[in-house]
Image (cartoon, rainbow, N blue to C red):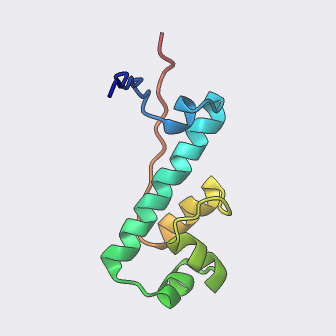
Amino acid sequence: MNREPKTSEKSCGNVFIDIGFPQPEAIVMHMRIEVLARIIGRIKEQGWTHADVAHNLDISQRDARRLLEKNVDPFTLDMLLIFAIRSGLSARLEWNSPRK
């Protein structure tokens, strides 16, 4: 059996850039995923039920379900940051100088 060796490309660290999204949109999508992961981690850490999530984050049962299913699509970055803060997390925005 003749198989060609698989080649791989090094990731830049943001899968959305790697698959071709423009950099500004890719950065925001990456941030949304990261914030969602932190929220899910906090929910698990606290042992919250579905109802607890809805109550503590002040969201509908439907949105709680979407969040627990890790469906980031319905939520903007600012919404996710609000949920993170309501869950007891704190956040800090850090700006970096452009790379030369």
Q: Quadrant of the N terminus?
A: top left
Picture quarter containing residue 24?
Answer: top right
Residue 97 vertical placement versus 86 (above, below): above
Residue 98 vertical placement versus 28 (above, below): above
Who is closer to the viewer here, 9 or 92?
9
In percent of width and height, residue 35 lies at: 48, 56
In percent of width and height, residue 37 lies at: 43, 59
Who is closer to the viewer here, 10 or 8?
8
- Residue at the (37%, 67%) spot, across then down: 41
Q: How many marks?
A: 0
Residue 29 showing in the rendered view: yes
- Residue at the (50%, 74%) spot, across then down: 68
Give left or right: position of 2 versus 57.
left
In percent of width and height, residue 45 lies at: 31, 74
Give left or right: position of 79 versus 92.
right
Residue 60 showing in the rendered view: no
Give left or right: position of 79 versus 52.
right
- Residue at the (66%, 29%) spot, across then down: 22
Residue 5 vertical placement versus 42 (above, below): above
- Residue at the (57%, 78%) spot, across then down: 64
Who is closer to the viewer here, 37 or 100?
37
In percent of width and height, residue 56 lies at: 51, 82
Picture quarter containing residue 19?
Answer: top right
Picture quarter containing residue 60?
Answer: bottom right
Residue found at the very far front of the displayed protein: 1
